C-alpha cells in the first residue's frame, strides 16, 4: 500500500470514530425527586465537549419530567466564558437558573454565583448576584445584590442585602473609601 492509501484509511477511520463517539452515560434510580438521575460525561470527540460542555447531570421526577439539570463546562470553556457550572430547576412553567462563575470571572466581576428567576415566558424577573466578600461592596457587608426587571427586560430597581436579608445602604463616600482600600490591598500583594 502506498502512503496516499494509508493516509486515506487513517482519515476514514478517524472520521468514523468521531461520527460514532458516544458519551459515557450512567443512571441511578431513586433520586430525591422520586425518579432517576442521568450522568452524561462527554469526551473530546463529542460535539457537546467541543461546544464547551464536559458533563451534564439531569434529574427526573417519578413521572419522567425534568426537575433539575446541571451542566459543567470544560476547563477551556470555563476560562473563555467565565462560568464553571450552570444549574436549572424546573417547577411546571417556572424555571430558576443558577450560574457559578469561574475563579477568574469571580475575581473581576466581584461575585461567585448568579441566580435568575424566570417567568413563564422565559423572561428574567429577578437576578441575584452572590457577592465575593473581598469585593468592594462585599467589604461593606453586602452578601447579595438583587436586581428586578419589568416584562420588557428593563431594570426597575435593585437592593443590596446582608447575610440575613437586611437591606444594606452604601453611601458614595463609603464606597470610594472601600474601593481605595481594596485596590490598595490588591496592589500590595
Image (cartoon, rainbow, N blue to C red):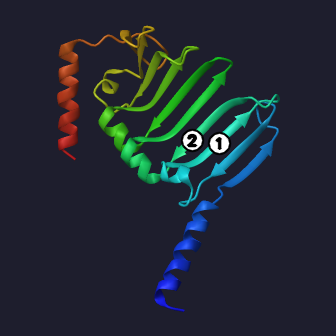
Q: Is there CB contact under 8 Å for labels 2 and 1?
A: yes
Which residue position is annotated with label 1? 57
Residue 51 drawn above or below residue 58:
below
Out of 58 and 44, give the one closest to the viewer: 44
Quadrant for residue 154, please give it.
top left
Q: Quadrant of the N terminus?
A: bottom right
Measuring from the top left, give residue 76's x and y in whole percent.
42, 53
Residue 77 appears at what percent x and percent y?
43, 48
Question: What SS does tag 2 mark?
Answer: strand
User: In the rendered image of this protein, does residue 55 appear above or below residue 94?
Assistant: below
Q: How many badges with numbers are in the image?
A: 2
**Whole-number angstrom distance, CA of label 2 to CA of label 1:** 6 Å
x and y percentages locating residue 37 in the rendered image: 74, 40
Left or right: 6 as drawn, with respect to 80 = right
The 10 Å Cα crowd at callout 2, few under 14, some 14 to 19, many 20 or more, is some
Q: Position of residue 47 (x, y in %)?
A: 54, 52
Q: Residue at x 37, y 20 (%)?
A: 142
Q: Residue at x 39, y 41 (%)?
A: 82
Q: Nearer the viewer, residue 37 or 32?
A: 37
Q: Residue 144 vs residue 186: left or right?
A: right
The mark nearer the N terminus, 2 or 1, is 1
Q: Which residue is mark 2?
A: 71
Amino acid at each position: 500500500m502506498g502512503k496516499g492509501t494509508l493516509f486515506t484509511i487513517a482519515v476514514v477511520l478517524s472520521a468514523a470514530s468521531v461520527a460514532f463517539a458516544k458519551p459515557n452515560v450512567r443512571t441511578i434510580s431513586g433520586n430525591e425527586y422520586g425518579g432517576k438521575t442521568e450522568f452524561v460525561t462527554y469526551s473530546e470527540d463529542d460535539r457537546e465537549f467541543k461546544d464547551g460542555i464536559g458533563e451534564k447531570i439531569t434529574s427526573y421526577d417519578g413521572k419522567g419530567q425534568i426537575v433539575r439539570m446541571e451542566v459543567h463546562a470544560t476547563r477551556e470553556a470555563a476560562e473563555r466564558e467565565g462560568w464553571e457550572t450552570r444549574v436549572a430547576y424546573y417547577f411546571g412553567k417556572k424555571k430558576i437558573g443558577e450560574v457559578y462563575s469561574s475563579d477568574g470571572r469571580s475575581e473581576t466581576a466581584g461575585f461567585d454565583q448568579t441566580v435568575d428567576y424566570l417567568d413563564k415566558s422565559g423572561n428574567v424577573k429577578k437576578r441575584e448576584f452572590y457577592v465575593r466578600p473581598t469585593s468592594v461592596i462585599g467589604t461593606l457587608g453586602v452578601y447579595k445584590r438583587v436586581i428586578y426587571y419589568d416584562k420588557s427586560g428593563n431594570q426597575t430597581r435593585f437592593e443590596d442585602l446582608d447575610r440575613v436579608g437586611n437591606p444594606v445602604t452604601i453611601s458614595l463616600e463609603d464606597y470610594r473609601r472601600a474601593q481605595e482600600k481594596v485596590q490598595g490591598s490588591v496592589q500590595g500583594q
